[in-house]
Image (tube, rainbow, N blue to C red):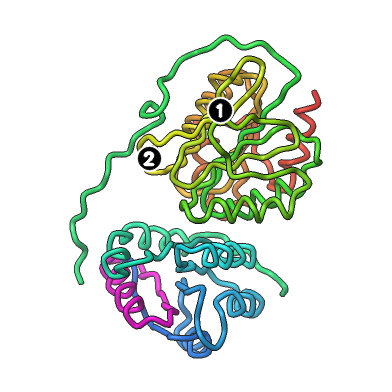
Amino acid sequence: MSKIKVVIVDDSALVRQILTEILNSDPGIEVVGQAQDPIIARDKIKKLNPDVITLDVEMPKMDGVTFLKHLMRLRPMPVVMISSLTEKGADITLEAMEVGAVDFVAKPKIDVKEGLDEYRDEIINKVKMAAKAKVRTYDVEPTRKMQVDPKLNADAILSKKTNKHFKTTDTLIAIGASTGGTEAIRDVLSMMPPDAPGIVISQHIPEAFSAPFAKRMNTVSTMTVYEAKDDQQILPGHVYIAPGNRHLVVERNGAQYVCRLNDGPPVNRHKPSVDVMFRSVSQNVGPNAIGVILTGMGDDGARGLLEMKEAGAPTMAQDEASSVVWGMPGEAVKIGAADEQLDLMAITPKILRLSKS
């Protein structure tokens, strides 16, 4: 089996060295080249024909997004952005995702060497995933043995229980996503009318990125989009996105639904976890909810979607053809959690039909 060939593009010699050591430590990956700016990168890509590029967002001569736009127009290929954990870095990274980057890794603010070393598994996994992902095209040293945290399920946050529900006219939409999800969510929200039912979203995203992501979604949707706050009432025409590093739980307060933020441990190694949100919706909203699982790596959300289905909620999964990575929706389909598989562009119309029935 041939190795995944990677070219690293970053203006920091230290970051290039660290990324090279991390990626070469995996037997399935080979760093075939480095470049300190996009001009050099262009020639390296032509010469070395890599399978994946890691690309810094902020560089001299040409910023990462401008280079990415040219690359996706002339030679579309999987790109993993290496982003700084700043508001500016978050904005640029989200723009890069719009342009066609598959995923991103957040670069630590301080002690880059130690920080990136801690991200070893994440960087390796995201490069491997990128090599297999569908690329959206646009016109315009040895491996260390590391301790791995146990993979918890939603029981770590909410115990499983069955509640009685009564069908009401108040619908709530719950959406979960991961890799490729920032753009999939954008597509879903951009087609929603301003009076659509309230929407709660858990997208795997770092803490520094969730507020800029919510602001960005607010500019493309006629609904009002927030980064969710604790005890915030869920209203029609409004969208509530889980903050990075907090689980979003939906609870009932009398006749109202409210957001609760939970600082418990990661579930399925994610925080926010889609399984946690879906379980809370199954328990507190039941058949009055609609569950949607979009593109993403891994299996977070699949079991929670099944719980929503068992509670009487209609459920759907993004189909493989339109997913960047068919991990989460694929697992949901595999275990029978999704009533149907839909192309991304068919999901919003289906949600609106169900919410009016």
Quadrant location, the N terminus:
bottom left
Quadrant location, the C terminus:
top right
Name the residue tied to disc 2.
Answer: 266
Is residue 336 visible in this depiction of the protein?
no
Vertically, is 206 above or below 36?
Answer: above
Q: Secondary structure at mark 1?
A: strand
Residue occupying the point 40% across, 36% down: 263
Residue type at mark 1: give it.
Val
* Local crowd size for mark 2, using a 10 Å CA cut-off: few (<14), some (14–19), many (≥20): many
Gap in angstroms between the C-alphas marked 2 and 1: 17 Å
Q: Secondary structure at mark 2?
A: loop
CB of mark 2 within 8 Å of CB of mark 1? Answer: no
Instruction: Give the magenta part as a residue range.
Output: 1-27
Name the residue tied to disc 1.
Answer: 250
- Horizontal and vertical percent position of residue 256: 65, 21
Marking on residue 103: none
